[in-house]
Image (cartoon, helix red, strand yellow):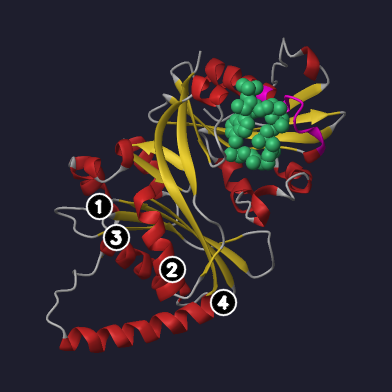
Amino acid sequence: MKLDANLTIPQPPEAPSQAGLQFAVATEEDFDEIMAMSQDIYGGLDYLPTRYTSWLQETNRLVILARKEGKVIALESACVIDDGETLLVEGLRVAPQERGKGVAGVLLRFCSELIKSKYPDVKVSRLTRDDQLGPKDFEKYRIITKQGILLVRFRAEELKLHLGQMMQTEGVRSSVSTRQAPPPPVRLDQTAIHQLYLSTELMQRVLPNATIIQDWQPFKLLPSNLAILLKKDIDWMVDDVCSPTVASLCTFPFKVPIGDDWYYLNIDMFGKDLDLAQQQFLCHLQQHTASLKGHVMCQIFLDPGLWRPMADFCQNTLNVELVKEYTEQCVVESDLL
Ligand SMILES: CC(C)(COP(=O)(O)OP(=O)(O)OC[C@H]1O[C@@H](n2cnc3c(N)ncnc32)[C@H](O)[C@@H]1OP(=O)(O)O)[C@@H](O)C(=O)NCCC(=O)NCCS
């Protein structure tokens, strides 16, 4: 069901402390106002500017704004996935001057009510958090899975050069070594993705809690979710289609507001084998630095145990800069009561 901007949104009956809030479905015209209140978000790495227009087109998604005295002060996106059973909450933000007053809580509850009334089959709400969860959160949520987040920064042209040199040295080394290098990873096309992820149970032991997490979004292994994922520009890779140990999904580089020639590359990596994870990471980097010019922030989501050795590999072998120490993304779920 597509909700349009003319929809009459019922205003919340409770929330006396937020009596002055009005709720509306976001439109193209709201873009500048939303960006104005989002300036400090994610240290300049906000994905919303590149996602906003497509979010408004998605038939299974609502983008809801809260206004105070006519001014946009908060946003939340609610997306229905998992065959209509899960509400995925994304993009939540409150204008800096309005934080700490309960606005996010009111908006979240309002969106849940709205989704329940439009999509009665929705049973749970899921979201991904990268901040420290407190005792109150643990009462509210079940943890579905956790992935370490490795954030590195480099100039595309420099890394391309360095990767070229590394490949030459590796070529010389393998020609004189008896060590068997693993075969190159396989890039999957749509047929192969369907075959591997849906027709077999092979990915269940590779994915954390049988969940594909792509760019912060958790999806169960269902045809309807794969249809959503296959509309996106993603490179899908696996070490071996018959017996997969490591799989990865990499976004195409997209612009972020931190600067004019800054791009973001997001790699979700599943599995615990370090050599295979490094090999796929290198393939994604080669693929995307081939024609890219400018600064790149690359975020790799991976098994927590791989974080340290992968960080060492990035710093010592790839000579790229580590932006942050260990953080993690936590996929959480609560019942939609
Ligand atoms: C995180 C943020 C939205 C909280 O806004 P706020 O109005 O100050 O929050 P509130 O005063 O309503 O209190 C927090 C409520 O929001 C929830 N909350 C806090 N952070 C959250 C998050 N990242 N995702 C979902 N819910 C969150 C809390 O669990 C709490 O819910 P409760 O009312 O059921 O207890 C706000 O600080 C912000 O915009 N930060 C920058 C953007 C950001 O980090 N967004 C998180 C995206 S994952």
Which disc is residue 293 wearing?
4
Identify which amino acid the numbered label 4 is placed on: Lys
Residue name at image x 69 percent, y 66 percent:
259
Circle 4 packing at 10 Å, graded few (<14), some (14-19), many (20+), is some
Element on which disc 2 rests: helix
Q: Name the amino acid, label 3.
A: Leu
What whole-number distance in Å separates the C-alpha atoms at marks 3 and 2?
A: 13 Å
Label of residue 191 in the image: 1
Left of 90 or right of it: where is 193? Answer: left
Q: Tell me the magenta residue range.
A: 97-105
Task: Where is residue 320? Give x, y as percent.
Answer: 50, 72
Left or right of residue 190: residue 96:
right
Residue appearing at x 38%, y 86% in the figure: 165
Distance CA(mark 1)–CA(mark 4): 32 Å
Residue 229 screen position, x and y as percent: 40, 46
Q: CA distance from mark 1 to mark 3?
A: 27 Å
Of the residues shown, which amino acid type is indicated by label 2?
Answer: Cys
Q: Is residue 173 left or right of residue 103?
A: left
